[in-house]
Amino acid sequence: MKIPVAKPYLTVEEAQSAYDTILTNWVTQGPRVQEFEEKFATYVGSKYAVALSNCTTALHLSMIVAGIKEGDEVICPSMSYIATANSIKYVSATPVFAEVDSTTYNIDVTHAERLITQKTKAILIVHQIGLPADIDAFKEICLKYNLKLIEDAACAAGSSYKGNKIGYHSDLVCFSFHPRKVITTGDGGMITTNNEEYYNRLKLLRQHGMSVNDRTRHNSTTVVREDYLEVGYNYRLTDIQAAVGIKQLEKLDWIIAERRKIAERYNEAFKNIDFIRLPVEPIDYITNWQSYVIYLKANSPVKRNDLMQLLLDKCISTRRGVMTAHREIAYKNYGNNISLPISENASDNSIVIPLFVPMKDEEVHYVIEQIINALLPD
């Protein structure tokens, strides 16, 4: 038995939808992209959605429309995939790394507020592996200090915060459809917003700053001459990807329900092992269980890296805990005076174990059995 840490849930329906789209000969930034955007916006409860090539490009364009520029500071967690910090650097601004909460591993509200200076222009929160951050608390801080709020919701499609889907609460929320995520388009991204000005500019920026989109030109009965209103980018999603995304979106709630069943089995299996800290789900927060991560406390008889190897020897794939950007070589000039002990400890002692749909009962049982055998040998 060989068990991956994750794999996408794709069926013949997605393949047929992509096939049908290919036969229309409209394969990029066309009607299926528009349909995907409209359906995604409806799903999360936002006014608008803008499809993009991936979540990193979504974060980049969010920085631009939020007015972030050289000399500005943006507060974000270091404990996140490096694209979070990179998106700030793309606009020549400075990422200011905040600590995470020791229970949820989401950005710590109190520490983030202490980092605010005259140069701070935005806070970029991350919904860690699908668990929502405290959006309301950060909205209050941003209102108090006149800052922009941007949500890195790369992992959070389908997650909910206080009764509403992630994507509903603020004006720049960025999603990923990478294969490691709960739903996928192969690769791809989306920004949801309720701000019409942002919406119009995002559409402009994703397609080279072109004043007229391809659908408008195609459907026009008169010659249309486009203008290029500002320096833009080629961050388009294809119609083939959108066709897959539409089918994936239809299954999202079911996929999350199935993932929750697996997570509950893990919770039950590991709850009485005192040196394991299990993931949490606070009241009024609903995670999509994009990943299941266990933390090994200091009294664990097996260290994290050793456990990963023991499981790999049993054909079970795992991944290290969420990285910390400030300790990566790319950010060596940022980390000299940074102390983020909670982030570092969590990153160094946590492990992502397999969770995907469909995961067979015997696969779940095997993962549980091998983890217990490795940690509690007879």
Image (tube, rainbow, N blue to C red):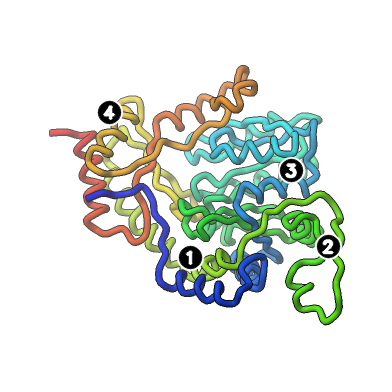
Q: Secondary structure at mark 3?
A: helix
Q: CA distance from mark 2 to mark 1?
A: 34 Å
* Residue at 51%, 53% in the rendered image: 178
Comparing labels 3 and 1, the label whose residue is closer to the camera: 1
Label whose residue precedes the other's in the sequence (1 or 4)? 1
Query: Mark 3 is on which residue type?
Result: Cys
**Mark on residue 252?**
1
Query: Mark 2 is on which residue type?
Result: Ser
Residue 207 is situated, as x and y percent measured from the top left of the image, at 74, 58
Q: CA distance from mark 2 to mark 4?
A: 59 Å
Label whose residue precedes the other's in the sequence (3 or 1)? 3
Label whose residue precedes the other's in the sequence (2 or 3)? 3
* Residue at 69%, 45% in the rendered image: 60
The residue pinned by badge 2 equals 211
Q: CA distance from mark 1 to mark 4?
A: 36 Å
The residue pinned by badge 4 equals 302
Q: Secondary structure at mark 4?
A: loop
Q: Secondary structure at mark 1?
A: helix
Q: Taking 200 as reference, is 167 left or right?
A: left
Query: Mark 4 is on which residue type?
Result: Val
Label whose residue precedes the other's in the sequence (4 or 3)? 3
Q: CA distance from mark 4 to mark 3?
A: 43 Å
The residue pinned by badge 3 equals 142
